[in-house]
C-alpha cells in the first residue's frame, strides 16, 4: 500500500519526505515540476492548496503515481492512495 493523503498538509509532508529521500533540493524539484522554489516550500509546509495540475506535476517529478482506490463503507479514512 502507499501513503494515504487526506489534506494539503499531508500532501506537503509526502512531497518533502520523497524529495529528501531522493536527495534533491526544493529548487531542483521546482525545476523538474515547472514550479517555483517558493511554491514547493509553501506546499511542503502545508500552507498552499495545490491544484490537481500542480499535484500531478509534483508526483511525476518525484516518480510517484496516483491511484484511485474504492473504499468500503467501513473504511472512510482516506480518499487517495499514493505510491512511489
Image (cartoon, rainbow, N blue to C red):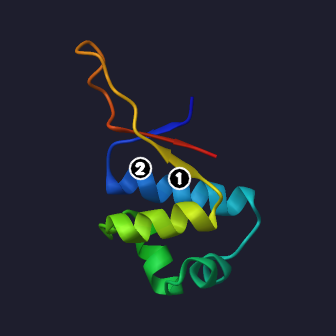
Q: CA distance from mark 1 to mark 2?
A: 6 Å
Q: Is residue 19 left or right of residue 75?
A: right
Looking at the figure, which quarter contains the N terminus?
Answer: top right
Marks 2 and 1: in contact by CB < 8 Å?
Answer: yes
Residue 51 quadrant:
bottom left
Q: Residue at x 58, y 63 (%)?
A: 60
Estimate the x, y position of residue 26 in percent, counting from the top left: 61, 77
- Name the one closer to the observer, 15 or 51: 51
Estimate the x, y position of residue 64 in percent, counting from the top left: 60, 53
Q: Residue at x 75, y 61 (%)?
A: 22
Q: Residue at x 29, y 67 (%)?
A: 49
The disc at residue 10 is 2
Q: Is residue 14 left or right of residue 73?
A: right
- Name the one closer to the observer, 8 or 65: 65
- Name the residue tied to disc 1: 14
- Check the image and report above or below for 14 versus 19: above
Label 1 element class = helix
Mark 2 Cα shell of 10 Å, populated few (<14), some (14-19), many (≥20): some
Amino acid at each position: 500500500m502507499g501513503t494515504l493523503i487526506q489534506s494539503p498538509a499531508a500532501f506537503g509532508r509526502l512531497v518533502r519526505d520523497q524529495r529528501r529521500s531522493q536527495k534533491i533540493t526544493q529548487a531542483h524539484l521546482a525545476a523538474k515540476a515547472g514550479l517555483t522554489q517558493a511554491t514547493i516550500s509553501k506546499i511542503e509546509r502545508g500552507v498552499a492548496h495545490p491544484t490537481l495540475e500542480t499535484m500531478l506535476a509534483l508526483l511525476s517529478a518525484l516518480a510517484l503515481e496516483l491511484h484511485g482506490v474504492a473504499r468500503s463503507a467501513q473504511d472512510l479514512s482516506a480518499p487517495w492512495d499514493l505510491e512511489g
